[in-house]
Image: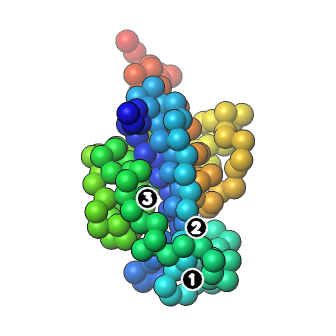
Amino acid sequence: MDKSVFACVDVEGSGMSPPELVQVGVVLLNQKFECVHEATWDIRPNNRITYWASRVHGLTREKLQNAPSLDNIGDEIVDLVSGKDVVAHHASGDVKLLKRSLPGLEITKVHDTLKLARDLFPDLASYSLDALCAELLGSDLPEANSFHNALDDARNCAALFRFLQKNISAPRQGELF
């Protein structure tokens, strides 16, 4: 029986308009926010990957030439993520791309770590995923850490989500009981 409740996801796109998925990372968490499964897919796009997108995530059409197409692995992603709450950093872009690329995907609810971090910590200098992880997680950052790698970003998002969830009910500095 599947004990996961949350699917922390990150996607990397081709940079085209509309973008194609070129990499997906998923970290499944149970209701105690413990990791129960991880998965990642490199995806061969049908069209080119822009220079600027490649500069961000390091993926090129040549690097992905032997990767499966979305037609070959899309059902795996749908099966893993559907029916779960999706957690993502700046979730609107990732969720929009996932839903457009995977029409059978059913998302229960979306949790945006960017919005949650802004609500809980309104005075931080930056709310990028890497800045929040450095500021809030410090040494609790997951071991493998390559920003703009979908699985590493999904791991970082999961760690940030876990931290933020623990701080939702905790009193924050300056608050009165």
The residue singled out by tag 2 in the image is: 42
Residue 128 appearing in the image: no
- Please report the residue visible at 63 percent of the width from the left and 77 percent of the height from the top: 66
Residue 47, placed above or below residue 106: below
- How many neighbours does mark 2 have within 10 angstroms: few (below 14), some (14-19), or many (20 or more)? many
> Could you tell whether 89 is left or right of 104 in the image?
right
Which quadrant is home to the C terminus?
top left
- Given the image, on which type of amino acid does mark 1 rest? Ile
Q: CA distance from mark 3 to mark 2?
A: 13 Å
Residue 76's disc number: 3
Which quadrant is home to the N terminus?
top left
- Please report the residue visible at 42 percent of the width from the left and 74 percent of the height from the top: 71
- Given the image, on which type of amino acid does mark 2 rest? Asp
- Please report the residue visible at 59 percent of the width from the left and 45 percent of the height from the top: 156
The residue singled out by tag 1 in the image is: 49
Residue 78 appearing in the image: yes
